[in-house]
Amino acid sequence: MTPRQNRNRDRAERGIPDATVARLPVYLRALHGLQERGTVTVSSEELAAAAGVNSAKLRKDLSHLGSYGTRGVGYEVEYLVYQISRELGLTQDWVVAIIGVGNLGRALAGYGGFASRGFRVAGLLDADEGIVGQEISGMVVEHIDRLEEVIAERGVSIAVLATPAAAAQTVCDRVVASGVTSVLNFAPVVLSVPDEVDVRKVDMSIELQILAFHEQRKAGGPLGEDPPGAAQYVETVEA
Amino acid sequence: MTPRQNRNRDRAERGIPDATVARLPVYLRALHGLQERGTVTVSSEELAAAAGVNSAKLRKDLSHLGSYGTRGVGYEVEYLVYQISRELGLTQDWVVAIIGVGNLGRALAGYGGFASRGFRVAGLLDADEGIVGQEISGMVVEHIDRLEEVIAERGVSIAVLATPAAAAQTVCDRVVASGVTSVLNFAPVVLSVPDEVDVRKVDMSIELQILAFHEQRKAGGPLGEDPPGAAQYVETVEA
DNA sequence: ATCTGTGAAGCCGTTCACAGCG
DNA sequence: CGCTGTGAACGGCTTCACAGAT
């Protein structure tokens, strides 16, 4: 009996740690790279290096999915791709709508990595009459008024928000009211949603600020200088 | 003696937890929102709600910066904005170069939240002759050949990579060789860099896959069906 | 009385080191 | 012998609950 015949019988009973789930897509990408180069089998050490983690973490992560490796040998690339894809739900199609078709929305609509792995963009919507009707990446931009119809008719299950900050919460409320329970938010706001809705945020400005913090520590070191403007907070104490 | 006069004397001696640093920009944004509405003082409960965290976490986070609140009252918005900004290094300017001016690079170049908080885009570079010379958001796109010059002459300290995946590592090597130690990577690859270089990654495809995982759990529940394609892994065992 | 600042406890994730299997 | 899978130790982050300040 080969390990394959165990299939998902001996898989962990629900509950893969969030930290692990967040890394599975990275492993998957590394595996696809190996696959393209024709690699058939890979050790935890090699795959971990390709994914930028250490091998103990990789093995622990994979152990949450099941026993898909062979001791003394490693993991079969194709098989592991399949197992991770299945665990992530990528063996089925996910229908995505992009709301907000400015520069960012356009970039997202044209992003190849989208369609390639089970994510199908089924709608581009915007509030701007000048943008509605334009063809972007082979799709015609529709008016935001049709949001609820589009979600219902096309079975959208993931909404990507690329609207201005001011519009994001309103649009979010509407997609949630239409039954969407997964939102990817590019607008620089904290969205409030019911518990059952998952929101993930992509925020370049936050990432830059985190980099600035570390950069400051490297460059400034024990400089200790007050930055310009600090004086205000000494002098205006009783103002 | 007011708390202000303590200034940074009693601040934590180096070492703010990473998890805290990652949230400071969120607090900062929430505070700016309050500031615009004219709020002078805010409690940990209110600010936490605006930032989407619980109040104990907020207070613990802020306690790593110093004692900037007033017991029985709360935090003074303007003062806290200043302290967090200073901690993050936003009271100084950071010079940014955007490398790769496709759809995404364009979106980034036009992003307002960039310039507004101490990040100055000092260069747009691309390898495509058709793009070089174009004016984007008031800047002329330069050829990637000039990368090293641009970094050195303009004092670039943060590189934003918006290139195709295949080019990212090469470009990264070049910016690192030019002395850049902070990289914000939008390309879907794991970059390898020396230890002293900080890399942060923004990857929509990964975020979507994480959403898909959770969405699958909600919808599929204890469905247990094998997805299409699964049969292959039973039938081809000895193939 | 109110709300901050913080020890202490608990939880989660990472790393170690080796048992177990091929 | 080689490499996976995993219990156990460790370290960091979150949460609790209350002492302390105004």
Image (cartoon, coloured by chain):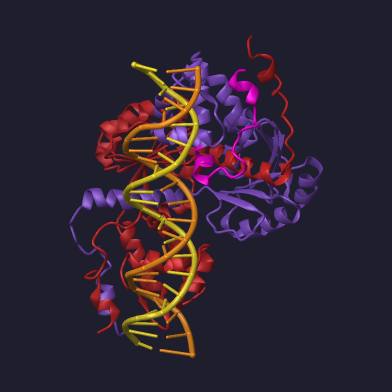
Chain colours: A purple, B red, C orange, D yellow
**Looking at this rendering, what residue extends furthest in the top direction?**
B239
Per the rendered image, the range of residues in magenta is A1-23
Please determine whether, in this image, residue B59 is positioned above or below residue B238.
below
- Residue C4 in the image, given as x and y percentages of width and height: 39, 76
| Residue at image point 27% right, 52% down | A216
Residue drawn where x is 67% and y is 44% of the image: B217
Give residue B201's quadrant in the image: top left
Quadrant holding the C terminus of chain A: bottom left
Closer to the camera, B209 or B116? B209
Q: Residue at x 52, y 18 (%)?
A: A35
Tell whether position A189 is magenta: no
Position of residue A6 in the picture relative to residue C19 (left or right): right
Q: How many marks?
A: 0
Task: Let me know if residue A13 is in the magenta part.
Answer: yes
Q: Is residue A178 left or right of residue A205?
A: right
Q: In the rendered image of this protein, does residue A191 appear above or below residue B70?
A: above
Image quadrant in which the N terminus of chain A is located: top right
The one nearer the camera, A238 or A218, is: A218
